[in-house]
Image (spheres, rainbow, N blue to C red):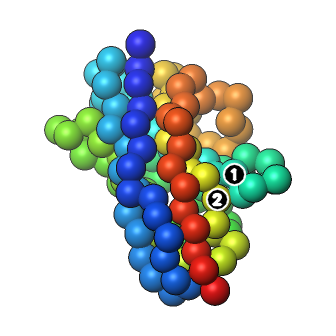
């Protein structure tokens, strides 16, 4: 059973940076494509970024493109989300996701496992 544990959330001021981490266990990490979603309070969960199994391909939501970077370290079974130039509208619970079939995209139905989430709050 794949387990995902996020860390790195917190409270920062607008313009600051944060790096989220997600540690995976229970399956060969390099078999999983990975991603991040977020859910602002009272709103729908939305796609943020995804990365292929090798790390060679990435995909971003337009709202974060150029500010956020997704990466992975297969030796450490960890995926990262580097968030720069944070804005108040980035405030949300951030969820790490894993797909067994190599999917990288924005359809949340195609991800098989979800982490418990980590809160990011950006004050303006």
Q: Is residue 89 above or below residue 70?
A: below
Q: Position of residue 21 (x, y in %)?
A: 36, 50
Query: Residue 9 shows which numbered tag?
Result: none
Q: Nearer the viewer, residue 62 or 78?
A: 78
Relative horizontal placement of residue 82, taking residue 67 as reference (left or right): left
Write the residue at 38% across / 63% down.
Answer: 19
User: Is disc 1 surrounded by few (<14), some (14 to 19) or many (20+) residues within 10 Å?
Assistant: some
Secondary structure of the residue carrying numbered label 1: strand
Write the residue at 52% across / 83% down.
Answer: 13
Q: Is residue 22 above or below residue 12?
A: above
Visible residue check, residue 85: no
| Labels in figure, total | 2
What is the spatial separation of the Cα atoms under label 2 and label 1, in whole angstroms? 5 Å
Q: Position of residue 124 (x, y in %)?
A: 63, 86
Visible residue check, residue 8: yes
Q: Check contact, mark 2 vs mark 1: CB within 8 A.
A: yes
Q: Is residue 77 above or below residue 26?
A: below
Write the residue at 30% across / 42% down.
Answer: 78
Relative horizontal placement of residue 81, taking residue 76 as reference (left or right): right
Q: Between disc 2 and disc 1, whose residue precedes?
A: 1
User: Is disc 2 surrounded by few (<14), some (14 to 19) or many (20+) residues within 10 Å?
Assistant: many
Secondary structure of the residue carrying numbered label 2: strand
Q: Which residue is mark 2?
A: 92
Relative horizontal placement of residue 7, taking residue 35 as reference (left or right): left
Q: Nearer the viewer, residue 84 or 99?
A: 84
Write the residue at 57% across / 23% down.
Answer: 112
Place residue 4 in its image quadrant.
Answer: top left
Q: Which residue is mark 1?
A: 39
Q: Nearer the viewer, residue 96 or 109?
A: 96
């Amino acid at each position: 059973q794949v387990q995902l544990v996020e860390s790195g959330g917190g409270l920062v001021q607008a313009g600051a940076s944060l790096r989220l981490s997600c540690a995976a266990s229970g399956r060969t990490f390099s078999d999983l494509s990975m991603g991040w979603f977020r859910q602002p309070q009272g709103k729908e969960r939305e796609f943020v970024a995804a990365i292929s199994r090798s790390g060679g391909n990435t995909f971003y939501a337009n709202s974060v493109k150029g500010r956020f970077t997704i990466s992975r370290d297969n030796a450490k079974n960890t995926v990262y989300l580097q968030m720069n130039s944070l804005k108040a509208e980035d405030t949300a619970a951030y969820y790490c996701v894993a797909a067994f079939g190599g999917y990288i995209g924005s359809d949340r139905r195609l991800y098989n496992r979800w982490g418990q989430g980590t809160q990011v709050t950006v004050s303006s």
